[in-house]
Amino acid sequence: MPMLSDKQKLMRRLQQSSFALTEANLYLDSHPTCKDGLKYYSQHKKEHDELMAQYTEKYGPIRAEQTDTEKEWSWAVTPFPWERGES
Amino acid sequence: MWQYEKKLQYPVNIKDPNPALAKVIVSQLGGPDGELGAALRYLNQRYAAPCREVQAILSDIGTEELSHMEMIGTILYQLTRNLSMKEIKESGFDVYFVDHTTGVYPIAASGVPFTAATFQSTGDAIADLTEDLAAEQKARVTYDNILRLTDDPDVREPIKFLRAREIVHFQRFGEGLRMVQDMLDSKNFYAFNPSFDK
């Protein structure tokens, strides 16, 4: 296992949290009134939003709308995820 | 509408380029059971789904397939970087290279370009969902075969993730099919098209 950069470590946490939401979302599509599922989703949503805010503040936007427009359009300048070391 | 997120669903970081492997993995981009076909199948079928839950399942799984297309594109991109002409010729990648250089193009490993003829949108939710169950199993088989063809852990890990997603999607489509079947009443015991015959 190669050494992960701090950026990659945070990205992995975001990916894990995001995946929990994707998985719960699909489950809830076929079980829309499941209380445990709804609770699971809302807990992970909170964690996801915190990680997303942490990541975008440090490393730039994940979605174009998160771009800080003070200096430059960083959306077009920060790396895309298919590059090695970006995921 | 859709919004792009600048992140992969699961990490892909491949140390060793391997054009021969790219030549077979490309089938999961543009082949008969690939991710592009999966995304287009579900995202086009969803209009005929007779209930909201199945509309949601098709929309969300179709969307997830787009992120899988991006993972396969990333694997292909990283497997084909910094190649010498010698490596291109000796690996058999030359037959792809002649048309696409190292560009990512949706094609089956056999050389057939992506075609919508590999999937259906019948306008009948029972027929569509039954196809979707088979589609997830067929994609799972392709991932099993890719896993038989490589021992590189950098490639195996994301492929194992994608294989597991086929199994989860199969489960969700099974629930969707059951829901549609439960909606059929005694007047439609023989499952005439619940999307068209009101």
Image (cartoon, coloured by chain):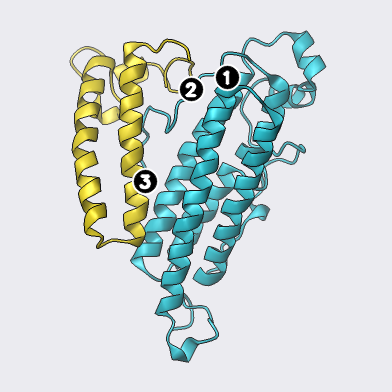
Chain colours: A yellow, B cyan
How busy is the neighbourhood of tag 2: few (under 14 within 10 Å), some, or many (20 plus)?
many
The reply to whether residue A31 is in sight is yes
Q: Residue at x 52, y 78 (%)?
A: B193
Q: Do residues under tags 2 and 3 come within 8 Å of each other at their CB atoms?
A: no
Q: Do residues under tags 3 and 1 come within 8 Å of each other at their CB atoms?
A: no
Question: Quadrant of residue A12 in the image?
Answer: top left
Instruction: Pick whichever, A32 or A37, lies toward us.
Output: A37
Secondary structure beneath label 1 = helix
Q: Do residues under tags 1 and 2 come within 8 Å of each other at their CB atoms?
A: yes
Q: Chain of mark 1?
A: B
Q: Residue at x 43, y 46 (%)?
A: B63
Q: How many marks?
A: 3
Left/right placement of residue A55 relative to residue B53 reads left
Which labelled disc corresponds to residue A82?
Answer: 2
Mark 2 vs mark 3: in front: 3
Residue at far bottom of view: B187
x, y (%) of residue A61? 28, 23
Secondary structure beneath label 3 = helix
- Residue assigned mark 3: A23
Instruction: Pick whichever, B121 or B61, lies toward us.
Output: B61
Which labelled disc corresponds to residue A87?
Answer: none
Q: Mark 1: which amino acid?
A: Gln
x, y (%) of residue B103? 63, 24
Question: Quadrant of residue B180 in the image?
Answer: bottom left
Q: Same chain for the residues at labels 1 and 2, yes or no?
A: no
x, y (%) of residue A65? 25, 30
Can you say whether A14 is above or below B64 in the image? Answer: above
- Residue assigned mark 1: B78
Q: Same chain for the residues at labels 2 and 3, yes or no?
A: yes
The reply to whether residue B26 is in sight is no
Q: Chain of mark 3?
A: A
Mark toward the start of the polypeptide (2 vs 3):
3
